Image (spheres, rainbow, N blue to C red):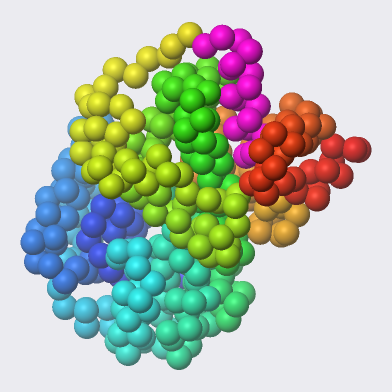
Amino acid sequence: MKEFKEPLIVGVVGAGTMGQGIAQLAAQNGSSVVLYDQLESQLTKARVQLEKSLERLKEKNKISFEQRMEIGSRIAYTNVIAAFSECDLVIEAIVEDREAKMNLLKGLENIVSEKCILSSNTSSISITALGSALLHPERFCGIHFFNPAPVMPLVEIIPGLRTDPNLIEKCRLLLQRWNKNPVVAKDAPGFIVNRIARPYYGEALRIVEEGIATENQIDSVMRCAGGFKMGPFELMDLIGIDVNLMVTQTVYKDFFYDPKYKPSLLQTRMVEAGLLGRKTGVGFYSYPANITNVAVDSGLEGRIFMRIISMLVNEAVEAYRIGLASKEDIELAMMKGVGYPKGLLAWGQEIGFEKISETLQDLYLQYQEERYRQSPLLKQLAKS
């Protein structure tokens, strides 16, 4: 399979926030873009938002007036799905619903040319399952961007069981040309980032549920002691508490209800109450919020930090052990996808795998829960 040749015609299905971002990214890199949505009102909103985004880039002197006009002219807005007939690549970015995506992909396959590559921006749904809707799943893969797509450097590429391996390399080279950092992940629940990052939120929620520390205390510890840009509760408010819960529920279910990924009752109640974070004005904090660090006793600080970082390192080690991705891609994904200050495998080595192992063993003895079981590889690393 030959490398993509520019200029490409890229189709984007879904004119929501993510679809808009992908369309802008492709247009900024010289592609002609067909942005589709069923709702004319959503297309109008997308056009306004994209024009504002390009105008901000011009005001910041990142693009010239001429570039701004040229990029905007490359994006065509349509509610006619037949407009994808000439596309080289189509990226689906609709609601995170398996059945809806599969029905869409079936329809797309009847419209696009036999040379067109189909892809999904899903963050958690099996690529193999989605590809089963197609007569030619070999030309389908996952291309998972992070929000906002024009800014966030990481993109996860996920082959299904029947994806042509050459297609993955073709997409990787394209994304590199778009100045992204592509990583390749196995088709496993949550892929790399959404799987490995689960304990950052889940263990923080557990600590609050147990009354060990407050949300603000935990956020302060992870920012100050850990060097994270945002604490877990601040970050959940930004992502959307409902969105974060949905990803956790999907990973939990798709891993056959593994206790490691068990959703939080506190988070569930927040969603039921409509306290979803910044988008509703209230989440774990009230907005506009002036979130500042609070003093935390050094003993409590150490307990909080080691508990969360040990769970994260254990998850990264296990991901590497089962071949979810290469060591380099795992480290890159967590730094570029969610802004971790260090790669977790390197961080575990720096802290000491023995100390990480001891922390998890103490938690297991205390709670007697499979949630705290160690990766077999972590046990080996702790002994070496």
- Which residues lie in the magenta part? 296-314
Quarter occupied by residue 53: top left
Q: Above or below — where is 156 with respect to 114?
A: above
Write the residue at 33% across / 30% down.
284
Could you say where residue 296 lies in the image, as x and y percent from the top left? 52, 11
Write the residue at 35% across / 50% down.
243
Write the residue at 63% across / 22% down.
303
Which one is nearer the viewer's eye here, 281 or 262?
262
Q: Above or below — where is 342 with respect to 43?
A: above
Instruction: Tell me, yes or no, whether the highlighted magenta stretch contains residue 75.
Output: no
Which one is nearer the viewer's eye here, 50 or 276?
276
Q: Above or below — where is 4 with respect to 223?
A: below
**Apparent side of residue 371 relative to residue 176 in the rendered image (left or right):** right
Could you say where residue 346 lies in the image, as x and y percent from the top left? 71, 35
Question: Is residue 214 visible in this depiction of the protein?
Answer: yes
Quarter occupied by residue 168: bottom right
Instruction: Tell me, yes or no, whether the highlighted magenta stretch contains residue 312.
Output: yes
Write the residue at 46% across / 19% down.
217
Quarter occupied by residue 144: bottom left
Q: Above or below — where is 271 with respect to 62?
A: below
Quadrant assignment for the C terminus = top right
**Apparent side of residue 310 relative to residue 183 in the rendered image (left or right):** right
